[in-house]
Image (cartoon, rainbow, N blue to C red):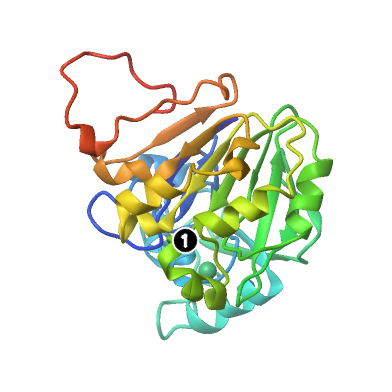
Amino acid sequence: MKLTVLGCHGGELPRCRSTCFLVDGQLAIDAGSLTSTLSLEDLIKVDHILLTHSHFDHVKDLPLMSDLIIGRRDKPVTIWSSAECTKTLKQNMFNNVLWPDFTRIKSDKKVPVLTLKSFKPGATFKIGRYTVKSIPVTHPVESCGFVINDGTTTMAISGDTGPTEKLWKVLNKTKGLKALLLETSFPNALQALADISGHLTPQTLEAELTKFDRKGCGGAALSPKSGIREPAQGRAQVPAGSGARALRCVRVLSHCWYRPRPCRHRWSSASPEAPHRARPPWLGRSTRRSPPPAWC
Ligand SMILES: [Zn+2]
C-alpha cells in the first residue's frame, strides 16, 4: 500500500493544502486537494473517493474534479460517504445551483461522471480490493474514521474528531496496523474552540493516545491543521508528552508548509518504521547533501 499525502491542513495557502490522502493512486480519502496537486493524468486514475464527512475543506475539489474528468473515463468515479454526507452533497453541491449535478451528466461514453454511494457509519464494506471499516467519531456533523485493509496492509485515519471512544476500541482490536493518521486541528491555546468544534489539540490528543494500546502499529502521522495558523507552535506541541510516546514513531505531517510544492509525502508499507525526519525550518538550510527521505 502506498499512501500519498496530498494535503493535511484545514485551509489553503501556498504550501498548505486541505485534507486529502491518496492510496495507491486510485483511492482518495477526502477531496481537499485533488485538483491542486494531481496532474490531469493522475486525476483520471482516481476511481474512488472516500469521504470522512461533508465539511468544505474535505470535499471542496469534487466539483472542479468532476468538470475536469468528464469524457476522459470509461466509468464513473464513485464517491463513498455516510448517508448524511451524501444528502449534503446532493442538496448543497451537485444541486444544479452551486454546481451542475454530475451524477446525472453523462460523458460521450454514456456513463455518469460521478456515482454517490452511501454507507451506514459503523458498517464494513468493500471498495475495489480494499476492505473499509467505518467508525463514527465525534464532530458537529456525521463524521467517520476508517480502517482500510488491502489484503496485506492495514492503515487507519481518524477523520475530524474531538475526544472519542469507538475509534480507539476498534483500533485496539485491529491487528497489523501499519499507519495511523490523526487530526490535531488547533493548538492548545485554542482549546475552547477545539472543544466546541469537535477537534483535537495536542493536549487532548495526548489524552486520546492513552486509550490506544498500540497493538502492532508501525507509526502515526499527526496532521495538525493548526500548522497553517501557528506552524511553530503546532509542530512543537504535537510530539510532546507520554501519549505520543505510546506510538513507536510519530510523524508530523505539518512540515509540508515549508517544503517546495507540490508536497507529496509517501508512506510505503515496506518501510513504515523509517520515517523521514524533516529539517525544522528554524534550523535554516543544510549544506550537507542527504539521501532522499523515505516518504518523499
Ligand atoms: Zn470537519
Residue 277 appears in the figure: yes
Horizontal arrangement in the rendering, residue 210 relative to residue 39 (left or right): right
Quarter of the N terminus within the rendering: top right
Residue situated in front as seen by the camera: 59 or 226:
226
Where is residue 87, by image quadrant?
bottom right
* Rendered location of residue 193, percent (x, y): 47, 75
**Which residue does the image show at 60% across and 41% down from the upper left?**
242
* Helix, strand or loop at mark 1: loop
**Which residue does the image show at 53% across and 35% down from the upper left?**
250
Mark 1 residue type: Ser
Residue situated in front as seen by the camera: 174 or 116:
174
Which residue bears the numbered disc 1?
185
Neighbours of disc 1 within 10 Å: few (<14), some (14-19), many (20+): many
Q: Check the image and report above or below for 196 versus 50.
A: below
Residue situated in front as seen by the camera: 53 or 180:
180
* Rendered location of residue 280, percent (x, y): 29, 35
* Rendered location of residue 206, percent (x, y): 60, 51
* Rendered location of residue 264, percent (x, y): 37, 37
Horizontal arrangement in the rendering, residue 160 relative to residue 93 (left or right): right
What residue occupies the far right of the structure in this picture? 173
